[in-house]
Amino acid sequence: MARFAEQVGCPLGQVGHCRCRCRCRLTPPPSPPLSLHKIPFAQVYQQLHEREESLSAELGLAQAQLFPLRKDNARLVRSVNELHRDAIASAEANEAELRGLRLERSRLATLAEEAAFLRAQGDAQLGARQAEVEQLKAKLQAFSDAFDGIDSDMVRAVSILHF
């Protein structure tokens, strides 16, 4: 380490205790390159071949596991699409029913207003007719009082026939 610190110019000469911001503190010394001349070619080839076989087996296993997952995924996508289509159809049906109910409510409100108007008109006519009846009863009573001398049976008969 001290040699690395000297190479990069550390003023303290020690990498672990360096308090300045020199390069020795920021980067470790590079590792020596691996020389291929020291490893026999047959051994490297054998390691690569074993690694390739291992990766090929892992790939086959991954593909075998992936096939059922893709199949399930496709089934789930179809199911989700069908549910989505059903939800859209249901929402459209609900909106149409809601529009129909709003129209029906509007129609019923109009009918209720008309019924209230007709009832008020009927009440007014009924009040007028009752007033006429009271006037006629008063006239009949006055007429009856005026003709007390006349046979009371006849007056009763007229009043029964009139009402």
Image (tube, rainbow, N blue to C red):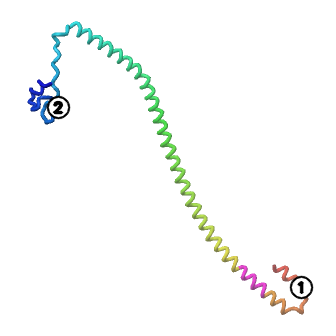
Q: From the viewer's perspective, is residue 122 above or below residue 73?
A: below
What is the distance, in whole Å, between disc 1 and disc 2 at their CAs? 143 Å
Q: Residue at x 84, y 91 (%)?
A: 145
Q: Nearer the viewer, residue 64 or 163?
A: 64
Residue 45, position as x, y percentages in the image: 24, 9
The reply to whether discs 1 and 2 touch (Cβ–Cβ < 8 Å) is no
Q: State the image coordinates of residue 22 (x, y, percent, origin top left).
A: 12, 34
Q: Residue at x 11, y 31 (%)?
A: 12
Q: Residues within 10 Å of mark 2 (few under 14, many from 20)?
A: few
Q: Which residue is mark 2?
A: 17
Q: Which mark is residue 154?
A: 1
Using a 10 Å C-alpha cutoff, classify the residue at mark 1 as few (fewer than 14 neighbours), some (14 to 19) or many (20 or more). few
Q: Give coordinates of residue 69: x percent, y percent.
A: 43, 25
Which residue type does callout 2 highlight? His
Q: Nearer the viewer, residue 20 or 143?
A: 20
| Residue placed most toward the observer, 4 or 59 | 4
Q: Which secondary structure, mark 1? A: helix
User: x%, y% of residue 115?
Assistant: 63, 67
> Can you say whether 124 is above or below 12 in the image?
below
Query: Which three-letter amino acid code belongs to the residue tagged 1?
Result: Met
Q: Nearer the viewer, mark 1 or mark 2?
A: 2
Q: Vertically, is 105 above or below 95? A: below
In the figure, residue 101 lies in which quadrant?
A: bottom right
Residue drawn at x 49%, y 46% as measured from the top left: 92
> Is disc 2 placed on a helix, strand or loop?
loop
Which numbered disc, 1 or 2, marks the residue that appears first in the sequence?
Answer: 2
| Image: magenta residue range | 129-138
Q: In the image, what residue occupies the spot 82% across and 80% down?
A: 162
Screen quadrant of the C terminus: bottom right
